[in-house]
Amino acid sequence: MVDAAVIITGAASGIGRACVELFTVRGFGIVAVDVDEGALRDLADSLGGEVVPLVADVSLEETGIRMTELALSRFGRLDVAVLNAGIGGTLPWEAGGAIERLDEILAVNVRGVAIGIRSVAPALRDGGGGSIVVTASSGGLQAEPGNWAYNASKGAVVNLVRAAALDYAAQNIRVNAVAPGLTETPMLGRQRARPAVFEATSRRIPLQRWSRAEEQAAVVWFLASAEASYITGTTLVADGGMTAHHGAVPLPPLVP
Ligand SMILES: NC(=O)c1ccc[n+]([C@@H]2O[C@H](COP(=O)([O-])OP(=O)(O)OC[C@H]3O[C@@H](n4cnc5c(N)ncnc54)[C@H](O)[C@@H]3O)[C@@H](O)[C@H]2O)c1
């Protein structure tokens, strides 16, 4: 039996996969949830025994029940939930299907997180408390052109985390979010593969580079761990300084 257990959604790729690897090193038993059956099988095969795969869609209520039951039946406990599954793919405002795409994005990014929170909370409470970490986005704190549906969904996540933190604080359940900036994962793989786009976007980031998935997993780990025992309701920004800049071009210095 493991000393601690975590549920990680969107576990088969990118930031979720980096979280699975980090929590494995820290000795956690892991329920790894994803819709991508092949990638999930590869992950479980490469990491071995304490990673239990669950092929399921986070936007369905039954997934919340199944993932929690799996953690309790396989590990006898639940300590942490990393609600990380998310999708992009905003269509232009006036394109055909743009509202249907908004519904899909909200279903995964907002409904999926709400289902996750309400599903894992009883198991965390029964264990004396725990920690929920949600993957928001710098795009939930500010907006970028052409990304309105995603921006709306991640903005909702930031306030959902605040609200859940208030409602669950008395049960010793902390709820926080990480807000990654541009991160090298398959989600933005096509943009990352275009050198001109990659270089132009990197130049706009104060640290002059995209983040690695492992850097985001480290923030998730911090928020989940006892090191963050007095932090709840917050969104920790890990964006290389991007949202620190309000966007204006520098003015020349005033000389007397
Ligand atoms: N990559 C970035 O630059 C970036 C920046 C800010 C925030 N984020 C957020 O980080 C999180 C992880 O993104 P990533 O970059 O690692 O992307 P990714 O595409 O590499 O991984 C996302 C994983 O989620 C899974 N998934 C998608 N829909 C699902 C569903 N309905 N149910 C279960 N699993 C589902 C996918 O199959 C995939 O394995 C997302 O919430 C994303 O919005 C990413």
Image (cartoon, rainbow, N blue to C red):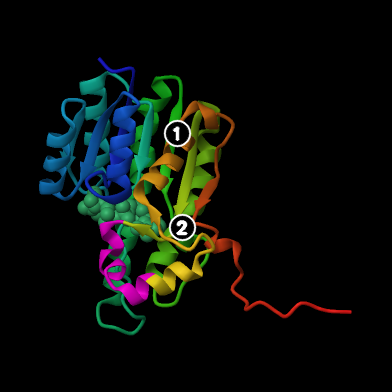
Q: Label 2: which residue? A: 156
The secondary structure that dominates the magenta segment is helix
Q: Residues within 10 Å of mark 1 (few under 14, many from 20)?
A: many
Most distant residue in the right direction: 256
In front: 22, or 73? 22
Q: Residue 11's mark? A: none
Residue 55 lies, in percent from the top left, at: 15, 43
Q: Residue at x 28, y 36 (%)?
A: 21
Tell me if I can see residue 62 in this picture: no
Residue 14 lies, in percent from the top left, at: 29, 50
Q: Residue at x 14, y 47 (%)?
A: 39
Q: Earlier in the sequence, mark 2 or mark 1?
A: 2
In front: 69, or 80? 80
Q: Label 1: which residue? A: 224
Residue type highlighted by circle 2: Ala
Which residues make up the magenta segment? 185-198
**In the picture shown, does residue 196 fall above or below 77?**
below
In front: 158, or 8? 8
The quarter of the rendering in which ligand 1 is drawn is bottom left
Label 2–label 1 contact, CB within 8 A: no
